[in-house]
Image (tube, rainbow, N blue to C red):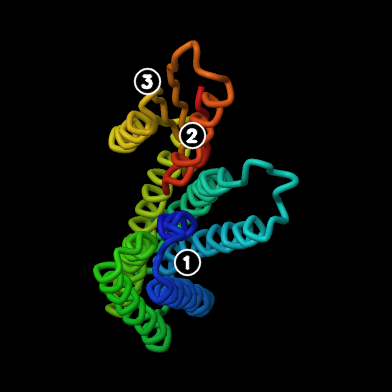
């Protein structure tokens, strides 16, 4: 759910200024559209008591809270305000925040599922006392259409610039688009009197989708917190870098594992026993700097 945010926080420093400004604009518009869905969805839930829209609203609420907290903390980290408390950075906040958001989603969406099933059981055969108005339908439809354009803009800009944050944003917007469009569809079908049951069924379907999405994301982030091994491609690139770094240093081993979103790398070098300590130190420090400059690298220890 927060893939776009991870992409934005870990984007390369060397991006072209024009591409960066385009990406920033699309991300801000995406956030504004998500907030508009939250406002319109809240109005729709209060006025129509639609369970399908409520299920989508729960997902959007937690998504916005997670994005807002992480963006705010990232601003503090960039300003140096948290460096005294977290001397090696606070990147682990992202996976912790995702896990907490997943727990909140499971709790809130389970409540929506319970309410939806109860509505289905108690409202047979006449249906619940709810009416999805034309105004609510139009408001939510406008947001869905705008979000469709945002998704298309993010995808086109990614194809042009290769910006990783835009790739993540396009995937996230597309997921939200499916969820929002499903809520609109299920709620709109209740305007047909005989299809009143579509709204609580939509509440169940959308809630299950939100639970699955957040749990899969939380599992991925939890693996990073525990220390999942890095991809073989990254290990291979570090191994190649270390092998070619200095002709007097022989590579013994390379280990790389997650410590949050980025990677910790451990490299062991073997040098001649007659090599001066200062030379060995300089070789190790220079290799450490080169590895830490890799986009995926956070810390490197050379022994």
Quick one: label 2 or label 1, which is nearer the N terminus? 1
Quick one: label 2 or label 3, which is nearer the N terminus? 3
Residue 237 vertical position relative to residue 254 in the rendered view, above or below: below
Q: Nearer the viewer, mark 2 or mark 3?
A: 3
Q: Nearer the viewer, residue 14 or 35?
A: 14
Question: Residue 177, located in which quarter of the rendered image?
Answer: bottom left
Could you say whether the residue bearing mark 2 is in a helix, strand or loop? Answer: strand
Quick one: label 3 or label 1, which is nearer the N terminus? 1
- The disc placed on residue 250 is 3
- The disc placed on residue 57 is 1
Q: Nearer the viewer, mark 3 or mark 1?
A: 3
CB within 8 Å, label 2 to label 1: no
Residues packed near mark 3 inside 10 Å, few (<14), some (14 to 19) or many (20 plus)? some
Q: CA distance from mark 2 to mark 3?
A: 21 Å
The residue lying at 56 percent from left, 46 percent from top is 91
Residue 171 vertical position relative to residue 216 in the rendered view, above or below: below
What residue is pinned by disc 2? Answer: 264
Q: Nearer the viewer, residue 256 or 43?
A: 256
Image check: 243 left or right of 115?
A: left
Q: Nearer the viewer, mark 2 or mark 1?
A: 2
The residue lying at 46 percent from left, 35 percent from top is 287
The answer to whether residue 124 is visible is no
Residue 16 vertical position relative to residue 291 in the rendered view, above or below: below
Could you say whether the residue bearing mark 1 is in a helix, strand or loop? Answer: helix
Could you say whether the residue bearing mark 3 is in a helix, strand or loop? Answer: strand
Q: Position of residue 273 (x, y in %)?
A: 49, 11
């Amino acid at each position: 759910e927060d893939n776009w945010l991870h992409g934005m926080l870990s984007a390369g420093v060397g991006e072209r200024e024009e591409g960066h400004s385009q990406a920033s604009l699309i991300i801000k518009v995406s956030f504004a559209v998500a907030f508009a869905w939250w406002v319109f969805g809240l109005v729709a839930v209060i006025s129509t008591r639609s369970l399908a829209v409520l299920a989508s609203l729960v997902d959007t609420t937690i998504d916005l809270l997670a994005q807002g907290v992480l963006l705010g903390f990232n601003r503090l980290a960039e300003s140096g305000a948290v460096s005294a408390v977290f001397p090696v950075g606070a990147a682990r906040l992202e996976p912790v925040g995702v896990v907490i958001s997943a727990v909140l989603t499971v709790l809130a969406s389970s409540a929506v599922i319970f309410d939806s099933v109860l509505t289905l059981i108690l409202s047979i055969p006449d249906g619940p006392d709810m009416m999805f108005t034309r105004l609510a339908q139009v408001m939510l439809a406008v947001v869905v259409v705008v979000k469709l354009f945002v998704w298309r803009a993010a995808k086109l800009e990614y194809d042009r610039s290769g910006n990783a944050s835009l790739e993540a944003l396009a995937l996230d917007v597309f997921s939200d688009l499916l969820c929002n469009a499903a809520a609109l569809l299920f709620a709109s079908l209740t305007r047909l009197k005989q299809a009143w049951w579509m709204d609580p069924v939509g509440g169940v379907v959308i809630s299950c989708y939100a639970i699955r999405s957040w749990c899969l994301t939380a599992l991925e982030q939890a693996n990073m917190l525990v220390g999942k091994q890095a991809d073989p491609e990254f290990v291979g690139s570090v191994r190649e870098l270390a092998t070619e770094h200095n002709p007097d240093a022989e590579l013994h081993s390379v280990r790389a594992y997650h410590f949050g979103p980025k990677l910790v790398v451990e490299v062991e070098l073997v040098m001649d026993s007659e090599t001066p300590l200062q030379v060995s130190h300089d070789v190790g420090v220079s290799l450490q700097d080169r590895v830490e400059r890799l986009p995926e690298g956070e810390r490197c220890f050379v022994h």
